[in-house]
Amino acid sequence: MRLERSHMWGIQGSPGSMFKLSKKADYGLIAVKHLALHRRDHACSANEIAEEYGISATLMAKVLQKLAHKSIVAAKHGSSGGYQLSKEPSQISALDVISAIDGPVLITSCVTNHGNCDATERCSVKEPLRRVNESILNVLGSVTIAQMSEDPHEPSLVALRT
């Protein structure tokens, strides 16, 4: 997955510009958190989750199918069917969900060996960007769905070093 640049603050890197996850990755995290919160109650349908959060049911169904394909959720068929988590919420990271939906998380293509940049030989930011990307992966990999499901008034999930 390539993080998209938000147009909320401008394209040219204006102060306050940010990177954001894709809409499908957002929906994947919403769905998995919902399933974590309701895992002891019942299997949840795509329609139920979509309705709860005001999301397109068709899009939610596609997101849940991708998550099922990557064994993050399991589909239950029948009259009490729907989706349930395949593992405990503490065993699923935000990175697992995002990668299942969008593939590898990359802030730019030059952080891999497959980049198409013409300036690779004389680039002075490739290594710093690789380290930034690695840090993002570490943070996303350390945040679990169990943590995301905790009381929102609890202290921050991840403390970033300054």
Image (cartoon, rainbow, N blue to C red):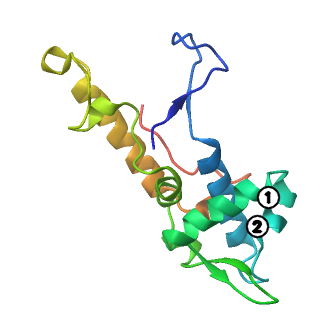
Residue 48: x and y, percent? 84, 67
Could you tell me if residue 150 is visible in this image?
no
Check disc 2 and report the residue beneath it.
46
Q: Above or below — where is 80 with respect to 3?
A: below
Q: Position of residue 67 (x, y in %)?
A: 56, 66
Task: Categorize mark 2 by other alpha carbons within 10 Å: few (<14), some (14-19), many (20+).
Answer: many
Q: Secondary structure at mark 1?
A: helix
Asked whether 139 or 80 is in front, the reply is 80
Task: Please report the residue visible at 20 percent of the width from the left and 16 percent of the height from the top.
Answer: 119
Which amino acid, mark 2? Ala
Q: CA distance from mark 2 to mark 1?
A: 6 Å
Q: Quadrant of the C terminus?
A: top left
Q: Which residue does the numbered mark 1 point to in the structure image? A: 57
Where residue 118 appears, as percent x and y from the top left, is: 22, 17
Secondary structure beneath dot 2 equals helix
Q: Say which residue appears at 80% left-offset and 88% top-offset.
A: 80
Tell me the residue at 79%/63% (across/down).
49
Q: Relative to residue 98, is residue 50 drawn left or right? A: right
Looking at the image, residue 66 sits to the left or right of residue 76; the answer is left
Residue 106 position within the rendered picture, expressed as x and y whole percent measured from the top left: 39, 39
At label 1, the amino acid type is Ala
> Mark 1 and mark 2 in contact (Cβ < 8 Å)?
yes
